[in-house]
């Protein structure tokens, strides 16, 4: 059923469990996540890996995760979890809370450039290019991040520093504090 060549795939349920751990423990990269899985018995147990099972390659993890997200598997997973909670009468239909926050993108402001601009000259320090935005008007209409084009420039309040961000929203029922809906969108797509 599976190909005998190439890297082995990851079972979807194990991938979802690993993603859940990555979010709950704020593990910022796939490589670091694979390292955590390699060393943590708790992570291995939760994911369903035996102590002698090999840990996946970070590239395989990333590509499989992207496939699941494009297929809306994460949304279906949350919907099924909520449905199971409803069947057990753990979800109230009376009072809900909506909360949102800016989620900082994993892109540097140094990657925020005018749309369509080609890099005309090599930076003075290729490892860490210097950027001077003083006196320059930047907006999401005229600029975009070269490393994460979907991230948008946003700030939490007046006088606060603008950062490349996404808007994260959660819908929670108040009786048991269960999350029943979640979405992440561009910071200015309210």
Image (tube, helix red, strand yellow):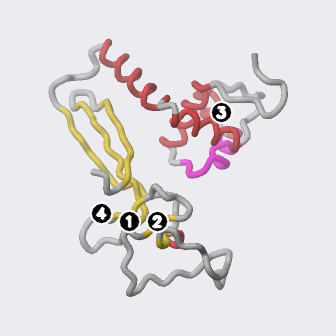
Tell whether position 21 is magenta: no
Given contact means CB atoms under 8 Å apart, are the residues at marks 1 and 4 in contact?
no
Position of residue 42 in the picture relative to residue 2 (left or right): left
Query: What numbered label is drawn on residue 140?
Result: 1
Q: Provide the secondary structure element on which disc 4 rests.
A: loop
> Marks 4/2: CA distance?
19 Å
Q: Provide the secondary structure element on which disc 2 rests.
A: strand
Which residue is identified by label 2?
A: 144
Where is residue 117 shown, x and y percent of the image?
53, 73
Q: Main secondary structure of the magenta part?
A: helix
Instruction: Write down the quadrant of residue 11 in the picture.
Output: top right
> Marks 4/3: CA distance?
38 Å
Number of the front mark, 3 or 2: 2
Which residue is identified by label 4?
A: 156
Given contact means CB atoms under 8 Å apart, are the residues at marks 3 and 1 in contact?
no
- Closer to the chain start, of discs 4 and 2, is 2
What stretch of residues is rendered in magenta?
27-38
- Closer to the chain start, of discs 3 and 1, is 3
Q: Provide the secondary structure element on which disc 1 rests.
A: loop
Along the viewing direction, whichever of 105 and 143 lies nearer the viewer: 143
Residue at point 72%, 36% (across, down)? 56
Which residue is identified by label 3?
A: 41
- Closer to the chain start, of discs 3 and 2, is 3
| Mark 2, other Cα within 10 Å: few <14 / some 14–19 / many ≥20 | many
Tell whether position 28 is magenta: yes
Query: Does 101 appear above or below 125?
Result: above
- Closer to the chain start, of discs 1 and 4, is 1
> Marks 1/4: CA distance?
16 Å
- Looking at the image, which residue sits at the far right? 5
| Mark 1, other Cα within 10 Å: few <14 / some 14–19 / many ≥20 | some
Residue at point 81%, 33% (across, down)? 6
């Amino acid at each position: 059923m599976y190909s005998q060549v190439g890297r082995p795939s990851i079972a979807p349920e194990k991938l979802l469990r690993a993603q859940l751990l990555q979010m709950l423990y704020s593990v910022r990269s796939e490589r670091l996540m694979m390292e955590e899985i390699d060393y943590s018995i708790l992570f291995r147990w939760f994911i369903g890996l035996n102590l002698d099972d090999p840990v996946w390659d970070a590239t395989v993890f990333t590509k499989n995760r992207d496939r699941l997200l494009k297929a809306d598997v994460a949304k279906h997973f949350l919907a099924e979890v909520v449905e199971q909670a409803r069947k057990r009468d753990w979800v109230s239909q009376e009072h809900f809370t909506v909360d949102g926050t800016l989620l900082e993108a994993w892109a540097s402001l140094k990657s925020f450039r005018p749309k369509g601009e080609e890099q005309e000259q090599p930076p003075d320090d290729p490892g860490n290019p210097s950027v001077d935005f003083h006196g320059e008007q930047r907006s999401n209409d005229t600029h975009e991040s070269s490393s994460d084009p979907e991230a948008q420039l946003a700030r939490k309040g007046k006088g606060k520093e603008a950062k490349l961000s996404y808007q994260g929203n959660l819908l929670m029922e108040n009786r048991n504090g269960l999350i029943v809906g979640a979405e992440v969108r561009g910071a200015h797509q309210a």
